[in-house]
Structures are given as structure tokens and as C-alpha cells.
Image (cartoon, grey):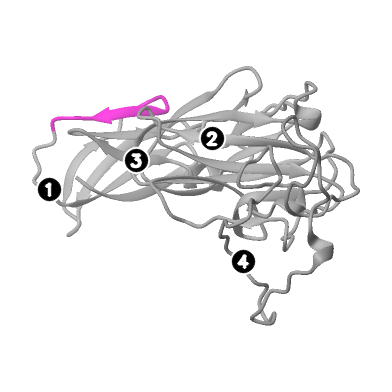
Amino acid sequence: YYPASGSGSNNYLSYIISPGQGFLVKLKAGAANSVVFKNIMRRAATPTATATTGQPFFRTLNVAAPSRYWLNLSNASGSYGQALVAYSQEGTTGIDYGFDGVEMADGPIRLFSRAENTNLSIQARPEFVVTDEVPMGFNVTAPGQYTVSIHDKDGVFADGQNIYLKDNLQGVTHNLSDSAYSFITEADNFNGRFEVVYMTSTLGTANPELALNNVMVYKNDNAININTGVLEMTGVAIYDIRGRKLYADNNLSGTQTAITGLNIAQQVIIVEVTTVAGKVSKKIIF
């Protein structure tokens, strides 16, 4: 992480990279293939409880303290991914080289914010306004229950500003400042399911195309689980890869169902879900 930006560090409370530590530099496209370090980039010495001289090694920026929060996405076994959003005078809503940290796209659980179609582990944004909205996405390699929670916060968020997670699939807005938010998902990459907002609002189905895209179908043990979020489900049909119908039920209601007792060998199947907003097909391995 780049500590001089005020948006993140290897220890998010220290702002210091100690001597002897390695780090990676991602250069802007077209930049020279070298990095120059100068004495002016050293951090001013700061006394501590155990020393009166010298701490290394970045310069202090004369800017207002940022307002930040760290969100974790975790599973029941304790594995997690983390994303940081930082509001400061230096940030923008676009890509800020030297401030933003592009997500490395590795690991079984990944949480990231989005800007200009880019996944970010660290995102610097302009000075905080309560009307801001931050697109969030995640990637998990196994289906199941996951939890979004606040790991840490400072600035206006430590002073009482609420952080809300907006679930576009379920049609709910949850106050993370009060408690963590748990949800069930299939294994995949989801760029449009979540947003972080700072005011509550009523959600509806004004965008049925987005709601259809967020319909979830996944295998759990020997059952096929279907969750249509905010859309009422009316029917389900299952086909094999050759187009032969294996199962059908056109008398469904509600937004969730689990199909069991399918007598089919392990294979790729196509699950067609009918909702009040239209049909969507998902391909899974059963």
C-alpha cells in the first residue's frame, strides 16, 4: 500500500514503511520504467514514547486528516477479503495514481470498490459528502453464507456518520454501523450487487434488467438453490446441455426455492427461472 497518500499503508494506523521492507510499484501506462526517490520524500522525524529522534520515512502531507473505513467480507471459517475507502482533499471519483490501489484479483474471497470499470482494494475519493455512493463488488470461489462488516473507521465515520450497505439483489439497505450484514451467494464475480451509501432510501424494482441479472442459482449439497431477490418467481425449468427438459414447476411463488430429489448424474445443466419481470437462464454443474 502507498502510505504517503493518506489512504492506506502496510499498517493502516502507522503510515510508515520501515527500512528493509520491500514493496511493489504499479506504473501508469506509458511512464518511464524507473522510480526515483529523493531526500525530500523522507518523512519528518516524530518522537515516540520510547525515542526522541528519527522515525522513517515519508514526508508529512499538510492536508486535512482523511475520513476512512475498512470493510471485511468474511466466511464462517474466518477467511476474509478487505477493501478501504478514503475521503480526502486529494481524491477524485476516478482513478488516482499514487492513491488508489488496484485489486490484485487473487484469493478465495475478494471485496473491492469500483471506479471507471476498475476493481480497487483502496479507493481515494474527494472530501466526504453525505450524498456520495460507492459501487462495491465481490468475488468468491465457493457458494455459501458471507458477511460484510466494518473492520475499522476514522474521521467523520468515527464521529458517528453511518455507513449503509445497499444490496441491489435483495432490495434492502443495511446499517453496517449498527451490525454486520450476512447474505447467501453462489460462487462467481459480482460487480453490481452492492453499493455503500450514507443516507437511507426506499429501494424498488425500477430496473428489472439489473434485478434479472442478479438472480442467483447455485448447488448446495444435492439441492439447487434459487434466489430471485426483489422479483417474484413464477416457475423453474431445468434442461441438460442437449436441451432435454429434466424438471419443471410452473406454480411457484415467492423469491426463494430449493429443488431436491433430482435423479441426474453429474453434468452441466441449464436452469431457466421465470419471474414477473421475465426469464433468465443460468448454467451450473450439478
Residue at point 73% right, 51% down? 56
Residue ID for mark 4: 25
Residue ID for mark 3: 217
Between the C-alphas of marks 2 and 1, the distance is: 35 Å
Residue at point 56% right, 28% down? 149
Q: Amino acid at mark 4?
A: Val
Residue ID for mark 1: 266
Q: Amino acid at mark 3?
A: Val
Between the C-alphas of marks 1 and 3, the distance is: 16 Å
Number of numbered callouts drawn? 4
Residue 91 in the image, given as x and y percentages of width and height = 80, 52
Residue 72 is marked as 2
Q: Is residue 133 left or right of residue 266?
A: right
Q: Secondary structure at mark 4?
A: loop
Residue at point 76% right, 53% down? 5
Q: Is residue 236 left or right of residue 138?
A: left
Q: Secondary structure at mark 3?
A: strand
Q: Amino acid at mark 2?
A: Asn
Q: Quadrant of residue 38?
A: bottom right
Between the C-alphas of marks 4 and 3, the distance is: 39 Å
Q: Amino acid at mark 1?
A: Gln
The local crowd at label 1, few if under 14, some if 14 to 19, many if 20 or more residues have their Cα within 10 Å, is few
Q: Check contact, mark 4 vs mark 2: CB within 8 A.
A: no
Start-end of magenta stretch: 252-261
Q: Secondary structure at mark 1?
A: loop
